[in-house]
Amino acid sequence: MTLSLKFVKTYADIERNVTVFNRDLQKNRDLDRKLVRSTQYWVYDLNTHFFGPNKFVAYLDMNFANYGDAQKVLNGRPQNKGELFNGTQARKAIEKILNSYEKNDRLEEELCSWGEALFGSDIFQGIDKTRENWQFVELRNASSLASNNHGDQFQNIDYAYLPNKEDFESAYRSLTRPGETISIDSVLDQIETTAKKKGLSLKSNWRMITEKNIEIWSKKR
């Protein structure tokens, strides 16, 4: 099998991989659960509240199929250009673009809530040593970083609005009637209607991201 992986080069590359990881997360139950339990270094997207494993996020246009193939073919072995499919090399690639990974008590709590909402309360049981070594780096607001000597790497980033938990709760309250069941599409439609009234331009993939977030927010209620 021939497989060539290249490291991410831009903020947008990282943002895309975090989104893909969360979008396809529960379609790959065996691999994603193992990856979530074994990861020590995490990328956190401050805009979407998504987490992404360092080793998944660090390679250009990564997806679960490529990740599985890379585990079989390239794990720990150098490619032609000397790039390695391992956590250390992945961490260095991420840190060239973002800040250094570090301990963060707030994000440890957020990660636990995220993982338990998606996989159940036992997702992080029995991995105390891994949890002790958790470190995080944040994807911050790209528009603020773009003015800070990061050049053209931000030119393709979508700066539009992404609904938050308050938007979801407001939409849900406006639709709720005693004895009625509200569909997720109805809530999303209401969020979109409210955003348009406020003159807000929504991110191109806002429905997918918000649906994932609603799943997490609802399980915290």
Image: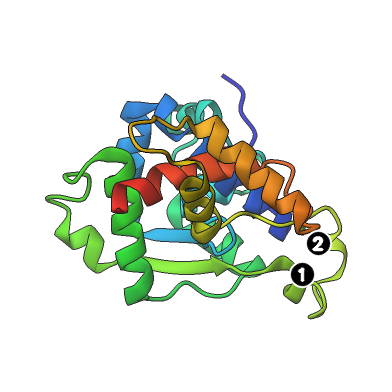
In this rendering, which labeled residue sits more in front, label 2 or label 1?
A: 1
Question: The residue tagged with tag 2: helix, strand or loop?
Answer: helix
Residue pictured at 42% horizontal, 76% vertical:
102
Circle 2: residue type: Phe
Residue sitting nearer the eye, 68 or 47: 47
Residue pictured at 62% horizontal, 49% vertical:
82
Residue pictured at 14% horizontal, 50% vertical:
125
Q: Name the side, left or right, on which 73 lies relative to 36.
A: right
Query: Residue 209 at x, y = what percent?
Result: 57, 44
Spatial separation of the CA atoms under disc 2 and disc 1 = 8 Å
Residue sitting nearer the eye, 217 or 86: 217
Residue sitting nearer the eye, 92 or 1: 92
Residue 137 position (above or below residue 169): below
Other-residue count near label 2 (Cα within 10 Å), few / some / many at <14 / 14–19 / ≥20: some
Residue pictured at 18% horizontal, 46% vertical:
121
* Extreme residue toward the bottom, this view: 148
Q: Is residue 107 visible?
A: yes
Query: Residue 186 at x, y = what percent?
Result: 56, 33
Residue 65 position (above or below residue 37): above
Name the quadrant of the N terminus: top right
Q: Which residue is mark 1?
A: 143
Residue sitting nearer the eye, 152 or 197: 197
Label 2 with label 1: CB-CB less than 8 Å = yes
Q: Name the side, left or right, on which 11 lies relative to 92.
A: right
Q: Which residue is mark 2?
A: 154
Q: Which mark is residue 208?
A: none
* Extreme residue toward the top, this view: 1
Residue 119 position (above or below residue 88): above
Circle 1: residue type: Ser
